[in-house]
Amino acid sequence: MALSGIQIYKLLPQTNCKECGFPTCLAFAMKLAAKQVELSACPYVSEESKAQLEESSAPPIRLITLKSDGYEVKAGNEVVMYRHEKTFYNKPGLFVKIKTSAPEGDVKTLAQRIQEYRVNYVGIELEVDGIAVEDDANNPERMKATINAVRSMSKKPLMLFSRSASSLEAGLPQLSGETPLIGCADSENWEKYAELAKQSKTALAVIADSVDGLAELTEKAKSKGVEDLVLVPEGKNLGHELILQTQIRRLALKANYRAVGYPTLVFCQNQAQMAQSIAKYAGFIVIDQFAEELIYPLLVLRQNIYTDPQKPIQVQPGLYEINNPQPTDPVLVTTNFSITYFSVANEVEGSGLPAHLLVADAEGMSVLTAWAAGKFDAERIAKAVKAANLDEKMTRKRLVLPGAVAVLSGEVEAELPGWEIRVGPREAVDIPKFYKQVLLVN
């Protein structure tokens, strides 16, 4: 049973030392009860109190980390049902399934593609997180050979799935020093799988078609000493799966029901299921096939949902040169909101026209939003010009403002004497036309 803030306060040293970052022990206790801080932040709590406070200090959804050589994937530690309440922290790990029945050459080719796949989205590198090896051949030797083939091409974290504990026993020694996930334990084989997970220090996936069934399995696995668990709610269809995921999340966060306070895993068969799993509320996702046109939208969706809504995606403010510009070429101004920056940069680069792109620090806001908030004005634009030392770099001083803030042109002229201030188009897509018809002519 979770403790209230007052109950936690009574177990704290009550010195109000402020070393935890809060003004009083009571304030810290309230944050601890809300699961917004960790008990370790208090340097003076007694060992006796630590034992009593363990339940209140533990996150409602346990953090599970899968590790390999130089890579790790984290799931769990979420504290809200909806991202707008606070934010989501650990985006679901995306794993691609490789079957042991596949020829070794095909396994290596696919593992290499997964390892090398990266795509840039508004300045963020997106990639697949790992590989799930499925023992569909029900053959320990094939499991061992497939893992070796995967590891020869990829170092990303692995999941191992088999209906036979002997196949998992054959494969795990190939992953010495790593922390994979094994599964899936059910009502019949849970004891063997739990013993193997404890012995090999791996995470264990348990599968059932109901919340009660999952809770029963986690309690049994914990009785065997297995703490790192992942739930696999086996929905009958897309709607039933959504119900199970929501029930698990709500019970963990709202009712502090420890038996289901673990990340979930979904085996996805189609894109609708993948999208639903990312949004509601999978910790790990295993997909059957690897195709760039399938992976990319999933990675973008995941990135958007797991971006802090209070912290816009930003690029570094400064001067960017596009298409090898000369000191006589124009300087285009924009804000450091990533989507705004890439919209402008891509249009200019695609046109082949040379330009200096000056990115002003607008705290990650778009042009109109930043202007309305007082974060993109003549003073900030002038400050960006001076910080980039453009007065000395440019032999022809032409500054092009976004059309949406044409009202700033007079103020910018006053801030930057000697500069020719132009007002560009409102939309990035119109920049090439404006450049050719106005800037190249005058």
Image (cartoon, rainbow, N blue to C red):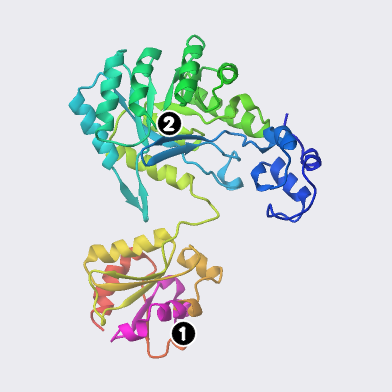
Q: In the figure, is residue 272 to the left or right of 262? A: left
Q: CA distance from mark 2 to mark 1?
A: 61 Å
In the rendered structure, which amino acid carries the disc numbered 2?
Thr
Residue at the (41%, 79%) spot, across then down: 385
Dominant secondary-structure state across the stretch colored magenta: helix
In this rendering, position of residue 315 left or right of residue 311: left
The quarter of the picture where residue 61 lies is top right
Residue 296 image offset from top left, x and y in percent: 33, 42
Quadrant in the picture for residue 355: bottom left
- What is the x, y in percent for residue 4? 77, 37
Q: Is residue 269 above or below residue 122?
A: above
The answer, for residue 38, to whether it is visible in the render is no
In the picture, measured across the screen, residue 40 lies left or right of residue 357, that is right
Q: Which residues are magenta?
A: 382-410
Asked whether 49 or 342 is in front, the reply is 49
**Residue 57 coordinates in the image, percent (x, y):** 67, 38
374 or 27, which is in the foreground?
Answer: 27
Question: What is the three-letter code of the residue carrying label 1?
Answer: Gly
Q: In the displayed structure, would residue 359 be above or below residue 233?
A: below
Question: Image quadrant for the N terminus?
Answer: top right
Tell which tag, 2 or 1, sits nearer the viewer: 2
- Pointer 1: what residue? 410
Of residue 207 and residue 291, the one placed in the foreground of this image is 207
In the image, is residue 403 part of the stretch drawn in magenta? yes
Q: Would you say 399 lies left or right of 107 here? A: right
Q: Is residue 152 above or below residue 319?
A: above
> Which mark identifies residue 179?
2
